[in-house]
Image (tube, helix red, strand yellow):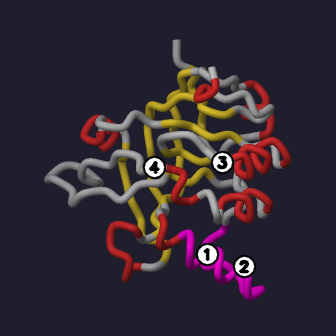
């Protein structure tokens, strides 16, 4: 049976999640992919303020297709998370609580997850149309010029995922 969690994640939520748990997320999260992560990272490297608050957030690695009538977004499946690995430890150190994507993560990311008591969720690749049904609203936050890769805020209801790497570093990709 899936655990139902209301976002934002709390430290207790994260502590109770174990690798392999099925989860249904409801609440708000942010989105971002490679290009947005690169920009955020460069701002951090230059000591500049980010255009979006990262602390306490969950970020979904997605670049959705255009929305069909009646939907907030079009098909919205996860992208391969390893492409964000270079940037992720810095965001976790700023207070990012969780990430949603697909695929294994680097040792550096896993170490940052454990160090910051965060969590990595895997969404099901190939289920983009199903996932889109759980996204009820979207709002552009920054980097509009990146199109589908812009940073957005999604309001989700029963967003399906599994705990891929828990706050202790237990990892479904290593079982």
Q: CA distance from mark 2 to mark 3?
A: 21 Å
Under circle 3, the secondary element is loop
* Residue 86 x, y percent position in the rendering: 64, 63
Under circle 1, the secondary element is helix
Q: Which residue is mark 1?
A: 40
Q: Earlier in the sequence, mark 4 or mark 2?
A: 2
Q: Earlier in the sequence, mark 3 or mark 4?
A: 4
Q: Which residue is mark 2?
A: 44
Q: Earlier in the sequence, mark 3 or mark 1?
A: 1
Residue 71 highlighted magenta (yes or no): no
Q: Counting other residues with Cα less than 10 Å from the Cα at mark 3, is it few (<14), some (14-19), or many (20 or more)?
A: some
Q: Which residue is mark 3?
A: 106
**Which of the 4 image quarters holds residue 143?**
bottom left
Viewer-nearest of labels 2 and 3?
3
Q: Counting other residues with Cα less than 10 Å from the Cα at mark 4, is it few (<14), some (14-19), or many (20 or more)?
A: some
In the image, farthest residue toward the right = 115
Q: CA distance from mark 1 to mark 2?
A: 6 Å
Q: In this picture, which residue range is highlighted in magenta?
A: 37-53
Q: Counting other residues with Cα less than 10 Å from the Cα at mark 1, is it few (<14), some (14-19), or many (20 or more)?
A: many
């Amino acid at each position: 049976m899936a655990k139902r969690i209301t976002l934002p994640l709390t430290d207790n939520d994260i502590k109770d999640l174990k690798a392999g748990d099925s989860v249904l997320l409801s609440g708000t999260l942010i989105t971002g992919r490679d290009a947005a992560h690169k920009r955020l990272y460069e701002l951090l490297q230059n000591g500049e303020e980010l255009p979006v608050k990262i602390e306490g957030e969950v970020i979904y690695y997605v670049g959705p297709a255009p929305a069909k009538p009646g939907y907030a977004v079009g098909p919205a499946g996860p992208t391969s998370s390893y492409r964000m690995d270079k940037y992720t430890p810095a965001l976790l150190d700023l207070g990012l609580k969780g990430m949603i994507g697909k695929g294994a993560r680097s040792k550096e990311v896993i170490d940052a997850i454990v160090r910051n008591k965060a969590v990595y969720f895997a969404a099901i690749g190939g289920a983009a149309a199903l996932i889109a049904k759980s996204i009820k609203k979207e709002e552009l936050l920054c980097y509009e010029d990146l199109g589908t890769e812009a940073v957005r805020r999604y309001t989700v209801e029963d967003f399906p995922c599994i705990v891929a790497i828990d706050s202790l570093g237990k990892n479904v990709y290593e079982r």
